[in-house]
């Protein structure tokens, strides 16, 4: 039973877990010894904006935090709003990489790849936002139902005290 639940969960969140893997993988690669940015003129501009370690740390930490949010969402408490925010933040990060490679003026497959990654994150954000809207609607319905029950109890208790035979 648990395996079926995990399979269903990962199938539903596959795009988001893929985003986590990309963030963590990219972050780790930049934090490994050696100048990754120095090997390619496509990445030199990024090195002028921030050190390779800063880029790597930002991507790695973002990936780990997003993995935590997805785990909490799947195991304990729905947090679709947080999932949507992380997906939008990740889209902005990949779009920044895309723009830096584009501005570098070199022909790099990364230009296409990072644009696709940013777009995938926008899709993931849209899906999470849809989940958030459903959660919000369900919460509103529960509050409205509770309010109606309270009002019905108040009316029922009031009528019963007024003389009930």
Image (cartoon, grey):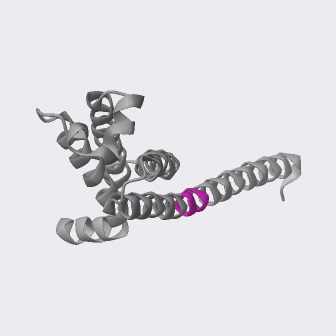
Q: How many marks?
A: 0
- Seen from the viewer's position, the closer of residues 145 and 15 is 15
> Which segment is the magenta one?
129-134
Q: Position of residue 69 (x, y in %)?
A: 37, 44
Image coordinates for residue 146, horizontal then vertical, percent: 67, 52
Residue found farthest to the right: 162
Of 15 and 137, the residue lying toward us: 15
- Rendering quarter of residue 133: bottom right
Q: Is residue 66 left or right of residue 35?
A: right
On screen, residue 72 versus residue 37, left or right, reads: right
The image quadrant of residue 66 is top left
Residue beneath the point at 28% across and 53% down: 22
Q: Position of residue 152 (x, y in %)?
A: 77, 54
Where's residue 144, x and y in %?
Answer: 72, 54
Q: Is residue 56 left or right of residue 138?
A: left
Q: Is residue 38 above or below residue 135?
A: above
Query: At x 39% / y 59%, what residue is drawn?
Result: 111
Q: Is residue 67 visible?
A: no
Quick check: can you spot residue 103?
A: yes
115 or 46, which lies in front?
46
Residue 36's place in the image compared with 18, above or below, is: above
- Specify the principal SS of the magenta part: helix
Whether residue 123 is in magenta: the answer is: no
Residue drawn at 49 percent across, 47 percent down: 92
User: Which of 164/83 is in front?
Assistant: 83
**Residue drawn at the location 75% of the way across and 55% of the way down:** 148
Give the vertical position of 136 relative to 57 (above or below).
below
In the image, residue 122 sits, relative to residue 4, either above or below, namely above
């Amino acid at each position: 039973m648990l395996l079926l639940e995990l399979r269903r969960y990962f199938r539903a969140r596959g795009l988001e877990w893929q985003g986590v893997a990309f963030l963590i993988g990219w972050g780790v690669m930049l934090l490994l010894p050696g100048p990754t940015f120095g090997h390619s003129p496509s990445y030199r501009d990024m090195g002028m904006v921030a050190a390779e370690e800063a880029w790597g740390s930002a991507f790695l930490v973002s990936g780990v935090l997003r993995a935590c949010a997805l785990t909490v969402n799947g195991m304990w408490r729905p947090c679709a709003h947080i999932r949507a925010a992380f997906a939008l933040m990740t889209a902005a990060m990949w779009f920044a990489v895309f723009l830096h490679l584009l501005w570098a003026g070199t022909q790099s497959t990364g230009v296409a790849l990072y644009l696709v990654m940013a777009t995938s994150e926008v899709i993931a954000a849209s899906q999470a936002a849809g989940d958030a809207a459903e959660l919000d609607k369900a919460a509103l319905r529960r509050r409205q139902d509770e309010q109606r029950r309270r009002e019905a109890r108040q009316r029922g208790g009031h009528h019963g005290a007024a003389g009930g035979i």
